[in-house]
Amino acid sequence: MRNLLLVLAMALLFLGCSSVTPKPKPNEKVFEQEDMLIMFALDAELRKHFDAAAEYFDILYEKSSRNEYRDRYYINLLRAKRYEYVENCIKEALKNESDDLQLRRYLVAALVGEKKLEEAKPIAIDIATETKKSHDYLVVSDIYIRQKHFDMALKYLESAYLIDYNESILDKMAVVMFVNLQRKDEAIAQLESHSRLHGCSKVICGRLVGFYSAQNDMDGLLNTYKRYYSEFHDSETAKAIIYIYSYRKDFISLLQFLEETGEDDDLLLKLYINAKNYKKAVALADKLYKSKGDIVYLGQSAIFEFEGAADKNDAAMLKKVISKLKKVVAVHDDALYENYLGYIMIDNDIDAKEGISYVQRALKKEPDSPYYMDSLAWGYYKLKECKKANELMKRVVDEIGMEDEEVSAHVKAIDACLKQVSPSRK
């Protein structure tokens, strides 16, 4: 394909740095092959064959005198790093067109590419003074940055920024101030001012995050993340906010953030549990069960509902909790829920034998658990099998002592049971 393009190019008149013919009317096709050459030129650009693209655009310009072809010709030469050629070509053209701004801009780009910064600088300054356009100010600032003259670079960046308050320009200003001039507070103040007037964009707040992190300023970091999250609601920023609140142990603010945003319901559930806010824990666990279908959430909901009940003997509540737990243990083989279900049934005199069967399932998984042995002992007590209950409670006391109030109450009740039966029953 490339050979064909070159043959076609050679078949047409090719003149680099040539004189200009009269300008055509807009949208007027000047010569027969124009559309074909445009297609070849754009294809070459797409393939990053910049030398070839420049050749096509030079032919197009020579045949049509359209400045847009001339501009693409020089742009592609600059992309191809033909800096010296562009410099010589434009200097020749400027002898007849000394006021052509665009040609002078290309000359500056070529000189910068050749690292002729001192030669490029006065031309760039003249252009910026004449046009007062942000792009031209940026070119001058770039030259000063390359020369490490950061104060002068900042001056031109500020001039560019004041034209349209472009956040990319402000970002460059902030980096120069923070990194090169060590004017860190001023850099942050500029970014903060812009973000409050124009919003906390990804560019500006992203830079603020970097600066506050560098200074280990957790307050600034948190405030920036919160403003950024209010704009974009992205999960990564939410994680950063959660991390900072957790690091500071500010669990009240963390809980409020999670309630308002719904970013991490599993963490919110843990906070409710730690705060013993069982009413909210039940509602959230039920919500998670419905949305995720994980039976564990139903089990948690049942436990929290029981723990949060004002009246542990409420029949309607017990029926609901037991129903939930039976659904859980039917499909989820977990000792925790089996023991909890069994103990509730035993302790509330609902069905001690069935309750014992659930506790025994739990003990098969964890045979040395003193808490599960306590549940089984209490089940035997409810069935008036006090000797069995007493033997188990001795093992429980050996393991965890009598400090637990419930264990202590069970020991006393079982001891009283033993005293009430005849010696032969003991």
Image (spheres, rainbow, N blue to C red):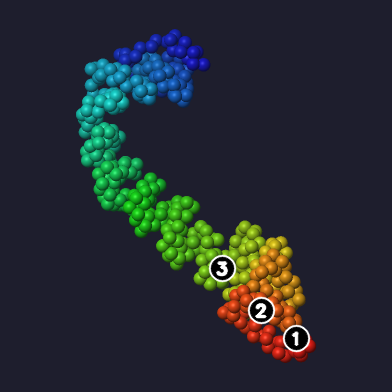
Determine contact: label 1, label 2, CB under 8 Å.
no
Rendered residue at 34%/50% (across/down): 214
In 3D space, how far apart are the residues under numbered discs 1 and 2 (Cα atoms)? 15 Å
Dot 2 falls on a residue whose secondary structure is helix
Res 394 label: 2
| Corner quadrant of residue 296 | bottom right
Percent across and percent down for residue 150 are 24, 39
Rendered residue at 22%/32% (across/down): 125
Q: Amino acid at mark 1?
A: Lys
Mark 1 or mark 2: which comes first in sequence?
A: 2
Res 426 label: 1
Q: Is residue 191 above or below residue 113?
A: below
The front one of 68 and 77 is 77
| Corner quadrant of residue 331 | bottom right
Give the side of residue 418 with respect to residue 277, left or right: right
Mark 2 or mark 3: which comes first in sequence?
A: 3
The front one of 343 and 306 is 343
> Crowding at label 3, few (<14), some or many (≥20) Cα neighbours within 10 Å?
many
In 3D space, how far apart are the residues under numbered discs 3 and 1 (Cα atoms)? 45 Å
The front one of 70 and 313 is 313
Percent across and percent down for residue 405 are 58, 81
Give the side of residue 91 with respect to residue 256, left or right: left
* Quarter of the C terminus within the rendering: bottom right
Dot 1 falls on a residue whose secondary structure is loop
Q: Is residue 318 above or below residue 76?
A: below
